[in-house]
Image: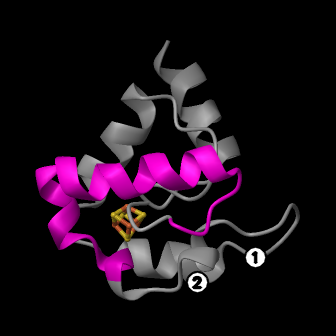
Amino acid sequence: MVVRDAAPPPDRRRRVVIQIETLPWAAHAKCLQADPETFFPEKGGSTREAKRICGECPVRNECLEHALENDERFGIWGGLSERERRKLKRMAS
Ligand code: SF4
C-alpha cells in the first residue's frame, strides 16, 4: 500500500506519506484513489476490497517487493495481508 495516511500508528502514517513521494512506482498505485482505511482493516476485518483493488494495480509486483524488502508489518501490500507476507517469506527462506 502506498496511500496509507490513515494507518495506525501515527508514525507509520507519516512514513507512508513519505513513500509516496520517494518511490517512483507509487505514482501509478491504484490505491491512490481508494480509501486508505480499506488497506488497514481492523483485526478480523475484511481484506476483500483492498485485494480487489490490488488485483487491478499495475505496480502490484513493485509494491509487494517493497513490502517484503522493508518488512512492512501493517496493512495490505501487493495484494497480500501481513500474515500472507510472513508465509511467503517463510516459504522463500
Ligand atoms: S498493489 Fe495494492 S497496495 Fe500496492 S500500490 Fe497497488 S493498490 Fe496499492
What's under tag 2, amino acid-wise? Glu
Residue at position x 24%, y 48% in the image: 62
Q: Nearer the viewer, residue 8 or 80?
A: 8
Tell me where the magenta segment starts and ends, as one range: 5-32
Residue 9 forms part of the magenta stretch: yes
Q: Is residue 38 visible?
A: yes
**Residue 35 in the image, given as x and y percentages of width and height:** 53, 85
Ligand 1 shows up in the quarter that is bottom left
- Asked if the residues shown at circle 2 and circle 1 are in contact, with their CB atoms under 8 angstroms apart, the answer is yes
Residue 65 in which image quadrant? top left
Residue 66 in which image quadrant? top left
Colour scheme of the picture: one colour
In this picture, residue 8 sits left or right of residue 75: right
**Residue 52 in the image, given as x and y percentages of width and height:** 48, 81
Query: In the displayed image of the protein, which residue is found farthest to the left?
Result: 24
In this picture, residue 77 sits left or right of residue 18: right
> In what element is the residue under mark 2?
helix
**Residue 54 in the image, given as x and y percentages of width and height:** 40, 71
Query: In the displayed image of the protein, which residue is found farthest to the right?
Result: 44
Secondary structure mostly taken by the magenta-highlighted segment of the chain:
helix
In this picture, residue 75 sits left or right of residue 72: right
Q: Marks 2 and 1, how far apart in space?
A: 8 Å
Question: Which quadrant is the N terminus positioned in?
Answer: bottom left
Residue 65 forms part of the magenta stretch: no
Residue, disc 2 = 49
Residue 33 is marked as none
Q: Is residue 56 visible?
A: no
Residue, disc 1 = 46
